[in-house]
Image: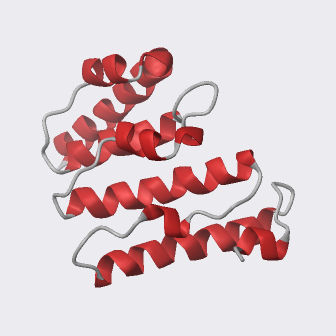
Amino acid sequence: MTDATRTGLTLDDGQTTWDVLSGRVEALRRRWDDAHAPPPLLEFVPEGSPSLRRIYLTELVKADLECRWSRRQPRPLEEYVAEFPELAGPSGLPCDLILREFQLRKRLGEPVNAEEYARRFPAQATELARLLTDTVATVSGSADRN
């Protein structure tokens, strides 16, 4: 039985939902710390309403991306969508998830640019252009001050 089923969580149960989500993300990070291979993300995703499940997936994928990229075991967002189609939702992937991949790649010195992300995620191109421009400016500004 999953936490969502056991507790009957809904989006209206803010604190409880957040507590369960934090526990799932921490469990995933601990599993990564103990694992020689990437842990199966499905083990950490609860059943529940589509909206709640998408929130859980988004945050779990962010944590998984960070663990993978820091270990030089990248997985593109498109592979997550293939495994979890509900992650994309009717309007595509959440922009904060796309931004997280961009930031991780940039932090690790990977070649990355806004045009690549506009090609990969055309439904979010306008919002990504704004977010990625702000991100690049912030990173550049930080480097200039150091």
Q: Residue at x 34, y 43 (%)?
A: 101
Relative to 123, 119 lies left or right: left
Relative to 115, 108 lies left or right: left
Q: Nearer the viewer, residue 91 or 70?
A: 91
- Could you say which quadrant of the image residue 37 lies in? bottom left
Residue 80 drawn at (x, y percent):
42, 45
Q: Residue at x 43, y 24 (%)?
A: 128
Residue 136 drawn at (x, y percent):
29, 32
Q: Nearer the viewer, residue 83 or 121?
A: 83
Q: Is residue 68 above or below residue 83?
A: below
Residue 21 drawn at (x, y percent):
63, 67
Q: Residue at x 35, y 35 (%)?
A: 135
Relative to 68, 123 lies left or right: right
Residue 78 drawn at (x, y percent):
37, 36
Q: Nearer the viewer, residue 45 or 58?
A: 45
- Could you say which quadrant of the image residue 117 lies in? top left
Q: Residue at x 19, y 57 (%)?
A: 73
